[in-house]
Amino acid sequence: MRTASFSDSYDRVADPFRSPLLAAKGSEPAAEKLCIDEMLQRHCGEFGRWQLKHFVLTSLAWALEAFHTMVMIFADRQPEWRCRAGWACEAGAKSVCGLEPGSWEWVGRSTVTEWGLFCGDKYKVGLVQAVFFGGCMIGAGIFGHLSDSFLGRKGSLTVVCALNTVFGTLTALSPNFSSYVILRLLTGCSTGGVGLCAFVLATEPVGPKARGAAGMSTFYFFSSGIALISAIAYIFPTWRKLYIASSLPSLLFLLFILPFISESPRWYLVRGKTNEATKIMSKIATSNGNHLPQKVFLTLNQQQQPRSLSLSSSSSCHHVALSKSITLSSSTCHVDTEVNSLNKSQSKCYLYKDVNPLNESQSTCHVYTGVDVNSLNESQCQTCHLVMTGSLMDMIRSQVTRQRLILAVVINFLCSVVYYGLSLNVVNMDTNLYLTVILNAVAEMPAFMITAMLLDRWGRKPLTIATLWFSGAFCLVGSLVSNVGVWKGVRMACGVLGIFGMAGTYNLLFIYTAELFPTVVRNAALGCATQAAQMGAILSPLVVVLGGSLPFMVFALCGIGAGVFAFYLPETLNQPLYDTLSGMEAKENSV
């Protein structure tokens, strides 16, 4: 009796990894299956008009993140003070802590003046800043997972912008310090997902040759946001008005920008929505003045071929209980749906593998039919789609991604301590706060340009090490000079050059981290790296309050140490952007 195999039936139905623009005719040549990178290179264009528009609109979200992050510099600042007329007051005193109460008054309003966050309570300023970054850490993990799963990149970006609008506006209405801390925590939770989702959404539709430069360019928007929030703070000097003014742009982005942004075709593909992914690729080709041939179909870069499932033509398909095992060739698949009995005429049951197998020797998978198998027919089987998913545990179980994840977490943590520490340390420079913040923001932009120019020449790894050590070296010099006389200018210059180097590294790490992991876990990996960065950001205000030369010394050690850890990362220049863990491991094992 002839045995009907799963692979035989598979040839008679639609490939779940591809979505044809038009149904293939029997007389047409064999279909060509391309992954997204190949389709962009051959037919759509790697960075044309469609990608430029999509990139600019999506990257505007980085300015929103800068607003909600750097607003604390101005809202929580300690304003100038002056002696009141008729009171015995030492006008030349460096601090008001030793002055008689009532003999002086603040010039300006902030949270410090609102709730008395100075002298003995000065630590509360660092506390609320640390709480905000703690919220960012939580939000990065949450929205990193949601953007990889059912919510998607665009859906997650929509949610975080809406939450930022609400929480930012409510912060301006805080009646006391406790409610202020809580609302800053909630704002941090939503802010933590903004840059993460925007970066992945902006760069995933870009071709491999242009992806590095495009990714590096996203941080121009963040630096521009820092400069803009300084101007906004100058216009709205009171902290309550400032929080409202910095929150309204999120609402404008939500209403007038997001409707013109498309979801990532890579996310559609790994979620099994190949029709939607193909439509976007066709739109990219058309907008760029190209044409996507009818015989070209979309596939994952590591095609997971179905394995044969033997079914006797004379017998019915047997009932398989939930989570029981059936043998597919040499591997085991767990069936996550109950397959009811089928009679001989209904023996065409097509089961598609759903998961992220780590490698061929661990080809455990989940099988879904996508329809009620009891009423299954061929047309229904054609609607079954493969859904590739991934999680943090999958990265940890894989030896390749586990080492990369640990190194990425450590490097991002140390880099964040330096970057945010130097940014917040402007309050210790005794200069014009608004001008200093703008200068620091402007100093970051040449770093982005230079690193973008060298990215594809030097490679990711050498450039990461160089920028980390550059920043660490100038922080070390800054720790060795005093903050008086001409040396005060030298220390400020060291701070600016330190930000210059670390800004390039911080930008580069998003590109580097994204390329170190496959699509199914890319946002989860970026979420972990971002969480680590937020942990470093939490620590940075505590380093700044040390004062003197100690902050620069800590920043120097972190920068130099991170450069040492970067030696153990692999180079990703001119390497494919993998979609699955199995594809990445297969490549690593073949080397």
Image: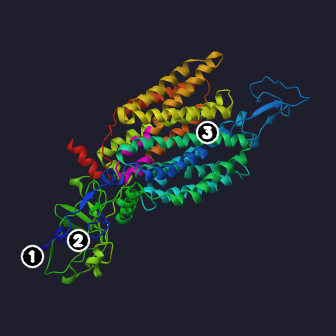
* Amino acid on which disc 1 is placed: Arg
Q: Is residue 548 above or below residue 254?
A: above
3 or 2: mark nearer the eye: 2
Of residues 123 and 481, which is closer to you in this image?
Answer: 481
The quarter of the image holding the N terminus is bottom left
Determine which quarter of the picture holds residue 437. top right
1 or 3: mark nearer the eye: 3
Q: In the image, 359: left or right of 290? A: left
Residue lying furthest top in this view?
A: 486
Dot 1: few (<14), some (14–19), or many (≥20) neighbours within 10 Å? few
Q: Is residue 107 above or below residue 331?
A: above
Q: In the image, 570: left or right of 70? A: left
Q: Main secondary structure of the magenta part?
A: helix
In this picture, which residue range is highlighted in magenta?
508-526
| Residue 2: image tag | 1
Give SS at disc 2: loop
* Amino acid on which disc 2 is placed: Lys
Residue found 59% across the figure and 19% down from its top: 490
| Residue 284: image tag | none
Residue lying furthest left in this view?
A: 1
| Residue 227: image tag | 3
Q: Is residue 407 above or below residue 547?
A: below
Q: Which residue is mark 2?
A: 25
Residue found 21% across the figure and 72% down from its top: 12
Instruction: Give the percent coordinates (x, y) of residue 407.
Output: 38, 38
